[in-house]
Structure formats: C-alpha cells, structure tokens
Amino acid sequence: AKQRAAPGRAGPARRFPHGPLVGCSCHWASAMETGSIRWEDLHPGRFFVFGTSLFLGLRGLLHPLFLIKTRLQAQTDGAYRGPVDAVRTIVRQEGVGGLYRGFWVSNVSLILRQGYFLSYEFLRSSTGPGTPLYETLGDTRGALASNFVSGCGASVLMQFLSVPCEVVTQRLMVQREGGGDVGSAVGMIRGIYRESGLRGFYRGFAASVLQYSPTSGLWWLSYTYYKAQVRSALPVEVVGDSLEEVSSSLAGLMSGTTTVMLTNPLDTVRVRLQVQERSGSSATNGIVSELRSVVAAEGVRGLYRGLAPRLFAVAPASLVMISVYDTIKRLSLKEDRKEAYYAERRERLRRLREGARA
C-alpha cells in the first residue's frame, strides 16, 4: 500500500520498477530496468545543453585518435607504418594542429548527436516495460530487444543527418601538408558539390547505415547485458553508493570493445568509400567491390587496418561516454522525479547489501 501511495510524486510504477534483486531467479531481468531514467523523467532543455557541452570536451580529447584511425584506413600508399608512426609523421609534417584537422566541422554533429540520444530515449520508452515487445519476449529478452531496436532506430535517423558532415570531416582528416590538396572546410564542401552534387555528401551512406545501425543496437544490447552481469558480480560492500556508476562504466568499456572487434571491417569499407573519389556505382555495389578490393590487395588483415587506434578510441570513449551520459541524465532529471530516482537507488543498494550478508 505504501508503494501505491507514492506515485503522486514518483509517476507510473514502470518508470522505477522495484523488482526483487536477490533471492529470485528473475533478479537478472529486474536489474536491467531497475532505476532506469526514461525520457519522460528528463527536462529536454537541460538535457540538450548539458549534453552538447560535456560531449564537446570529450570529442576534443578523442579527435586525434579518430583522425589517425581514418588515415590508416584510407591510405593506399603506405605512408604510415602504424599508429605511432602516423602520429610522428603528422606532427613532424603538419604540427600538432594536424591532429585536429576537421575538428570544428565534426562538432556540427554534436547537435545532431543530441537527436540520436533523444531518439534512443523515445524509442526505449516506446518499447519498454508494459509494451507488446515485453509481453511477447518477457522481461529479460524484452529489455535486450528494446535496447537493440532503440539503438538501431536512433542510428538510422542519425545517419541521414550526420553523413554529410562526416564526409567533409574525413576528407579534411586525410589531407596532408605539402600534398597540394589542403583546403578549408568551405572549399571542401564546394568541391564535393561541384564533383558529385548532393549525392557526393552521401557517399558511403549505405555502408554507414550497415555499420552504425547494428553497431549502435549491438552496443546498447551488450551494454544492458554487461551492466546487469557486472552489477550482480561487484562486491556491494566495496563499491557502496558508487555501484551504479562503476557498473555503468565497466559495462561501457566492455560494450565498446565488443562492438569494435565485430564491426571494424565495415568501418574500414565505410571510410574508404567516403574519402575516395568514385562514381558510376550504386551504394551496394560500392560496398561489395570495396570489400573485394581490400581483401584482394591486403587480405582479410586489411579489413582490420586501424583497429588499434579505433579500439583505443572507442573502448575508453564508451566508458567515458556512458559515464558522461548517465551524469547528463541525472543532471537533467525533472525536479519531481529526482526524489523518486534517488530513493530507488538507496532501496536497491539496501536490498543488495542484505542479499550480500545473507
């Protein structure tokens, strides 16, 4: 009765479900949704401002790694022998600023990325507990499927908005001083339009969707799975009140590593399609022909070119990203939702401690 009296402030019970976390075979499914912050609990304005600001700083730290990854994947002349040689060569020939080519253009996608998170949260709420998806698959599979579908759907929308920006950014990234092809972002945009029209800005679009959509879905699915497992395995008495933050961070790191290892071949093909000058082939044929070209020239190993810098960029970035994202969501909670959220965290921690002692 006490729990039913609270919804005046806490909202519908599905927002912060209190499933049993210990002493029950369904604790794993409950752990995946317990304490989850959903879109209806957030203040949109705060979410946008905090998200854009914090992710701008994160991008500044990681841009050099993505630039090195892009150059290694796009090169056909063997200019760089590996990630370390690439850094040395770029700094020697172009200065430290060479590591930040395309940085400001890439930041346009920060605003677009907020659209990705908005879409993800909206889809997750639409496919969450109480929906036909959960009723059909059950709590455990329903939670995994909801996160996979939401991640895939949000990514497809993101590609429509971000691929043009990505094409320009990557073309800027692969420019080299002294090569006679260094220009401004405006000049690059004009050049792409002059050569290929609007289609030029969507070069590699199919490859982007084929890579990023399942990658996004796989990331959120594996994150949901890993977080539940990590949360159950962590010693509650050691991590204490930081259980949520620690389990989220570790799950993010593991999810980033998993998705990078599985999707690097598609990432290599996508980058090559977007930075090379091509015409006369459909998007699908371009993907297939590029795969064949890479394997024929370099073997299967060529599909994993740039894996090391991508792994070092994406895996830690996933850890930081989910930590930042969870912080953004907590900062963006509506005032009438904060009390319910933190009360749920305290209750969950109390139950876990009781279970550990038992």
Image (cartoon, rainbow, N blue to C red):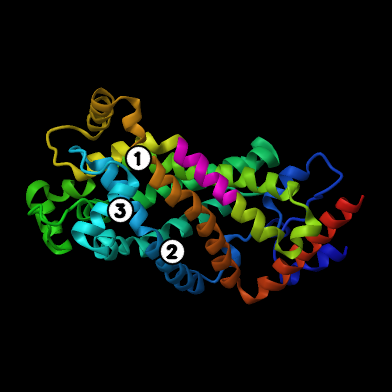
- Mark sitting on residue 134: none
Which mark lies nearer to you, 2 or 3?
A: 3
- Separation of marks 3 and 1 at Cα, in angstroms: 21 Å
Query: Main SS type for the magenta part?
Result: helix
- Closer to the camera, 279 or 95? 95
Please say if 11 is above or below 288. below
- Separation of marks 1 and 2 at Cα, in angstroms: 21 Å
Circle 1 Cα neighbour tier, 10 Å, few/some/many (<14 / 14–19 / ≥20): many
Q: Percent from the top left, x then y, of residue 5?
A: 82, 68
Residue at 54% x, 71% y is 43
Please say if 278 is above or below 332. above
Instruction: Decide which of tag 2 and tag 3 comes sooner along the chain.
Output: 2
The magenta-colored residue range is 251-261
Residue at 16% x, 32% y is 281
Q: Are marks 3 and 1 in contact (CB under 8 Å)?
A: no
Left/right placement of residue 164 relative to residue 142 reads left
Q: Percent from the top left, x then y, of residue 191?
A: 9, 54
Q: What residue is pinned by disc 2?
A: 58
Q: Are marks 1 and 2 in contact (CB under 8 Å)?
A: no
Q: Is residue 147 visible?
A: no
